Image (spheres, coloured by chain):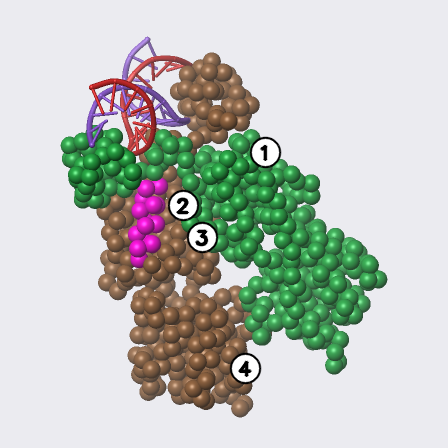
Chain colours: A brown, B green, C purple, D red
Amino acid sequence: MKNVTIKDIANIAGVSETTVSLSFQPNSRISKATRERVLKVAHDLRYVRNSVAQNLRGGRTKTIGFIVNDINNYIYHIMSTVAAQIGNQFGFQLLYADTQWDPSKAIEVTKTMLAKQVEGFMLSLNEKEDVSLDLIRHANIPYVVIDTIPKPFDGAYVVNDGVEIGKIAATHFAELGCKRVAFFNASKEMSLFSAFTQQIEGLESSLHSFGIPFSDEDIFYAGLTVEEGNRACTKLLERGACPYDGILCVNDYVAYGVMQTAEKHGIKIGRDLALIGIDNLEFSALDRISLSSIAIDYHKMTTLAVSKLIDSIEGPKEMTYQKTLAPKLIIRESTRTFGKGK
Amino acid sequence: MKNVTIKDIANIAGVSETTVSLSFQPNSRISKATRERVLKVAHDLRYVRNSVAQNLRGGRTKTIGFIVNDINNYIYHIMSTVAAQIGNQFGFQLLYADTQWDPSKAIEVTKTMLAKQVEGFMLSLNEKEDVSLDLIRHANIPYVVIDTIPKPFDGAYVVNDGVEIGKIAATHFAELGCKRVAFFNASKEMSLFSAFTQQIEGLESSLHSFGIPFSDEDIFYAGLTVEEGNRACTKLLERGACPYDGILCVNDYVAYGVMQTAEKHGIKIGRDLALIGIDNLEFSALDRISLSSIAIDYHKMTTLAVSKLIDSIEGPKEMTYQKTLAPKLIIRESTRTFGKGK
DNA sequence: TTGAAAGCGCTAACAC
DNA sequence: GTGTTAGCGCTTTCAA
């Protein structure tokens, strides 16, 4: 069954295609009578506009591409839903893709999106993906990088302050009186991602300023999931008694895993071990979990990124927005009672 | 800066547009020399194919529309990521939209997707949305309904057995020796969603068969979030001592809320109250939560739906696949120890 | 092995 | 207020 087109409507209504087209546009010429007749025919035929043709003709797609490393991560779920909601308010659709941390996949999806004529990009990629950025820059399409950025970067971004995250954690550990601190990192392959290196940078320098030792030996490669947190912690504890009384985890999932495994080994979180996560997922607030976590406002981050991007698409402005959001420590039972009432 | 087109390449390479176009198609005529020359020019110009034009001409978009009620729900996150992954394997892109449980919004997004020439639909909508289905059927595009369906329904679907969920829960409550059972439902507005009514149907009939009373009074309208679970439970407990020793919640989030609030009121989960969730989120498996839950295999559900849909799009087959998946009870501490060692 | 021409469905400039 | 014409970028006959 062929699609109903503007031509079919024109034939039946006895007008030209132009008249039909214009009838769909609110404030165009076209007498009331004609418009009503056309609209009636269109409705009877259950006509739906072919926006592929419309886009080709008009040169606009009202589409934004959103590329992330790993769509499975819960924070990208937050980002994508927020982006979709804000985007829709301005009539934009979002196209998602993830790269699975693979640069060649990143290039591929970037090309696909460019081919689909997206009008803007939101990117959360790692450092190795300059090629994607080059493609986008060459196409002269506005883009904004979110969540994390390569060190020297002159494009638009909305990110959180990774170094500050490390500092906040270090300061909290110091105040609690921790003697030895570990960092449970992402997997070795993805640990070059600047978000992670920045956190380590802040943690290390700040711990040192408090006289607490910290070196590469205190970094453990876990991953980004509960299961990986479990495994990394098991590996550590199998070596003997836990030498650490403070652990910062790369995200809350990993912290849940550490919490679980540590408790299986008789270590009481909040008394024997001060545990801090990053991201402040809603589950961390549950009384039974009560994980101290460093909150990143992904909602605000995404809102800012999308709205500035749309400004730039719609307006004549260059996309130059740069914003670094401040992380915030949320103290809960996993650290609050540390050192008290042993 | 204008986009590079096939024409630009043709001019520079000194060939026709046809030759350029064919050069991009693997097994076409075109001599090796010509093709290489064209490809070189294309690369130098960083040409990217305009797939809007390609789609218009070729009539294919390789796109699937995915419409759900509420994209914020974690299960839709699972479904969308799985759908995207499987789809991509077959070269399909996914377009997402949510309706916020609003039928008029559903019609709107359906039209937008039809306009974008999607080649298939995956839908998780409520009963009121016949209009969306009508539009899709009229356009003669294959579709599959997932997660839940209107009672009499002759289209393709992959769903879980809602009635069975209620029965499984009832049976478990009966075996535990529960005397009085409640159901924490979604909000009143969305409670017509057949997934929920089916669960109640199964729960009620099965409880009755075990001689356990259950009526409309035992249904509490909560919602789908932890916070709403908290609120509904608080409301119940403020009326006096909890009359229930078994509670089934519409999903795990709500169960987390009930767990939390009940414990604040001194009710010990697993001893005083048998608590069951639905969905079996990964967090329910954490030792600290250990929530018994009825698992729905969303991964399998989505995989089946997408792959059958793509079969139907690519092949000449009608889309008629119908599958009901069996839910499965996962027993954890929130029920395992009930009635023992008070 | 290559090119010319037509057309996918729509909109906008221009004429009437 | 309405119609004619051209063309967005691409692919596919058909002819050379």
Give percent across and percent down for residue B266. Answer: 69, 76
Which amino acid lies under the numbered mark 1 shown in the image of this protein? Answer: Asp
Q: Residue under label 4, please give it.
A: A264
Q: Residue under label 2, please give it.
A: B91
User: Could you tell me which residue is drawn at 53 percent across and 81 percent down?
Assistant: A263
In this rendered view, identify the residue nearer to me: A39 or B315: B315
Q: CA distance from mark 3 to mark 2?
A: 10 Å
Q: CA distance from mark 2 to mark 1?
A: 27 Å
Q: Are marks 2 and 1 in contact (CB under 8 Å)?
A: no
Disc 3 is placed on an element classified as: helix
Q: Chain of mark 3?
A: B
Q: Magenta residues: mostly which secondary structure?
A: helix
Which amino acid lies under the numbered mark 2 shown in the image of this protein? Answer: Gly
B309 horizontally vs B197: left or right = left
- Which circle, 3 or 4, is nearer the viewer? 3
Which of the marked residues, 2 or 1, is nearer the chain's N terminus? 2
Label annotation for residue B134 = 1
Q: Quadrant of the C terminus of chain B?
A: bottom right
Q: Are marks 3 and 2 in contact (CB under 8 Å)?
A: no
B194 horizontally vs A299: left or right = right
Q: Which residues are magenta?
A: A103-116
Label annotation for residue B85 = 3
Q: CA distance from mark 1 to mark 3?
A: 28 Å
Q: Chain of mark 4?
A: A
Same subunit: marks 1 and 4:
no
